[in-house]
Image (tube, grey):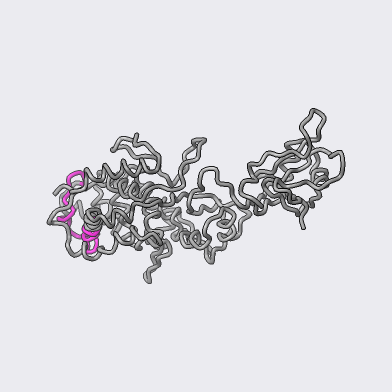
Amino acid sequence: MRRRGARRLAAALAAALAACGAQATEPADTAAAPAAQAPPAATPGPATRNGREIYARFREGLADPTCGPDTSQRWQRHFAAAPKKLAAPDTDVLPLFGYVVDALREAHLPTEYALIPFVESGYKPGARSGAGPAGLWQFIALTARDHEIPIRPGYDGRLSPVESTRAAVRYLKTLHGMFAGDWRLAVMAYNAGEYRVLGALKRSGQRAMDADPEKLVGLSGITHAYVRKLHALSCVLDQADDREEWRRALDRPVAILAPQPLPASVTSLDTWARQRRLDPSRVQRINPAFAGGRIAKGKRPHLVLAPVPAPNATPETTTLADAADAVAIEPAFADAAANAVAAAEPATAAAPRTHVVQPGDSIWRLAKRYDVRRSDLLERNGLSASGVLHPGMVLQVDAPSMSAPAQAADGVSAVPE
């Protein structure tokens, strides 16, 4: 039968978007740009969205939005706890689910695929199997290498939601095209391998474009059950949406997760998270690819999955590595200091120039910008090459009329103690 909540979901999505201050301008059959990747627009987007919006996007993307008496009762019972995991506010399941749904919608793929991590890992990025698979998508090492997921001492890309999800989406897109857009054949191939499914089609005298997956011969019962599992799980979520209590549990702000590059100079997730005023334990929990939270050196920049910063948010600390004598910006004394505009002396044509330190500034960059020597800039502000700059600090660019240490916007001396 057709799902009972179709109209209710449309209304819920509109309400959720209205609650977030957005307008529903995208056609229902067009995949929106995922929240997991920041758009190139100048204005920053929201840092959260309503949990019901995530669920509505999942429902909109389903290839098979029907549930009937033929839906496996066994697997519905098996996944009965899945709705509670999505609704629980103290877990990472709903934000991660939203990240995966966004990636699939961006790739124009059915959102049934977003249920694979439920089946494989329970949406636990650090899940490991005794047989060797690991991560959200439970890649084995050989498959990971085939899909360019890096594994090296101190870093297992299978445990990275970013690396593993990108690889899984690429693979599923290939399978989706290979099997004429039939999500059932694609997930069977994800489970058993594409060549086994191609062989089963040939032996069964079927074509991908009009296949009956239930009648394919030569595939294991586990592979046949994979389709039933995902469809049953989809129906379990559909039934949960009939319960007011569950809908209220989803009706809450949920952090939008996005891949963010780690600066080469950062050596620990804990430090990186604290610099951005994020919960270090949560960042490490979502990104278990980094053994012990330590950042192992690699040939390419690491990406960490973390909540996107709120609009106009200022990082607490920025580490710079643009020159050998670059000065690191340490924690700011006040949140508003980064945007303060101050001057050491009244602005006149002959007045010495000053500069209010912003996140990302360094002595090297400022000396180049104002065409002064770095040694002079350090000396005028009582700083050493190993000193620190604080956002909001007012630096003397030109020689002042009288010797005095630079002052931060809140009156704290810029000279390191």
* Residue at the spot 31% in from the left edge and 57% down from the top edge: 116
Residue 152 appears in the rendering: no
User: In the figure, 15 relative to 266: above or below?
Assistant: above
**Farthest top residue?**
349
Q: Position of residue 319 (x, y in %)?
A: 65, 52
Residue 260, compared with residue 140, is above or below; it is: above
Q: Is residue 274 left or right of residue 147?
A: right
The residue located at (79%, 52%) in the rendering is 384
Q: How many marks?
A: 0
Query: Where residue 273 appears, x then y in whole percent?
Result: 55, 57
In percent of the image, x 70 and y 48: which residue is there?
Answer: 410
**Quarter of the C terminus within the rendering:** bottom right
Closer-to-camera residue (215/393): 393
Q: Is residue 304 magenta?
A: no
Q: Residue 230 colored magenta?
A: yes
Q: Is residue 172 left or right of residue 415?
A: left
Q: Where is residue 113 drawn, in percent x and y?
A: 31, 52
Region rendered in magenta: 208-231
- Foreground of the two, 36 or 317: 317
> Which residue is the extreme one toward the right?
402
Image coordinates for residue 332, horizontal then vertical, percent: 65, 51
Q: Would residue 139 be visible to someone looking at this image?
A: yes
Quick one: 13 or 407, which is closer to the camera?
Answer: 407
**Residue 94, image quadrant:** bottom left
- The vertical placement of 413 against 229, above or below, is above
Magenta stretch, overall SS? helix
Identify the image quadrant of residue 159.
bottom left
